[in-house]
């Protein structure tokens, strides 16, 4: 005996797709936030290097 698959309710399909889309957006946002932190740290490291180099150059001219 084979069972006949039932067709899901169109409204249920719509809700499921909407939820899946929302979940994808939430995961994308969760991935962007660490990228922002990394970019901020990279900028801070570059600023620190610039300050150290400027200090070295300033001392060399004295």
Image (spheres, rainbow, N blue to C red):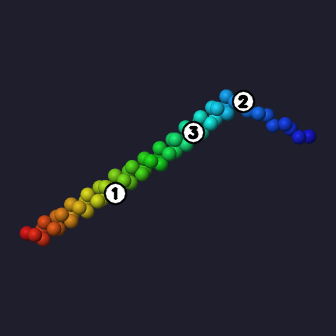
User: Alpha-carbon neighbours of circle 2 within 10 Å: few (<14), some, or many (≥20)?
Assistant: few
Viewport quadrant of the N terminus:
top right
Q: Marks 1 and 3, Cα distance to the nearest angstrom? A: 32 Å
Residue 16, which numbered label?
Answer: none
Residue 42, which numbered label?
Answer: 1
Q: Which residue is drawn at 63% across and 32% down?
A: 15
Viewport quadrant of the C terminus:
bottom left
Relative to 39, residue 22 above or below: above
User: Alpha-carbon neighbours of circle 3 within 10 Å: few (<14), some, or many (≥20)?
Assistant: few
Percent across and percent down for residue 30 are 48, 45
Q: Marks 1 and 2, Cα distance to the nearest angstrom? A: 50 Å
User: Alpha-carbon neighbours of circle 1 within 10 Å: few (<14), some, or many (≥20)?
Assistant: few
Q: Earlier in the sequence, mark 1 or mark 3?
A: 3
The kind of secondary structure element at disc 1 is helix
Relative to 50, residue 11 above or below: above
Q: Residue at x 25, y 62 (%)?
A: 49
Left or right, 47 with reference to 32: left
The picture quadrant where one finds residue 20 is top right
Q: In the rendered structure, are the residues bearing label 1 and label 3 in contact, judged by CB atoms less than 8 Å apart?
A: no
The kind of secondary structure element at disc 2 is loop
Camera-nearest label, 1 or 2: 2
Q: Residue furthest bottom?
A: 60
State the residue position of label 2.
9
Q: Marks 2 and 3, Cα distance to the nearest angstrom? A: 18 Å
Left or right, 7 with reference to 23: right
The kind of secondary structure element at disc 3 is helix
Q: Residue furthest right?
A: 1
Q: Which residue is drawn at 38% across and 51% down?
A: 37
Percent across and percent down for residue 43 are 31, 55
Residue 21, which numbered label?
Answer: 3
Camera-nearest label, 1 or 3: 3
Q: Which residue is drawn at 25% across and 59% down?
A: 48
């Amino acid at each position: 005996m084979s069972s006949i698959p039932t067709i899901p309710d169109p409204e249920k399909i719509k809700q499921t797709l909407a939820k899946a889309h929302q979940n994808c957006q939430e995961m994308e946002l969760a991935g962007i936030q660490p990228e922002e932190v990394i970019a901020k740290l990279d900028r801070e490291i570059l600023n620190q290097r610039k300050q150290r180099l400027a200090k070295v150059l300033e001392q060399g001219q004295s």
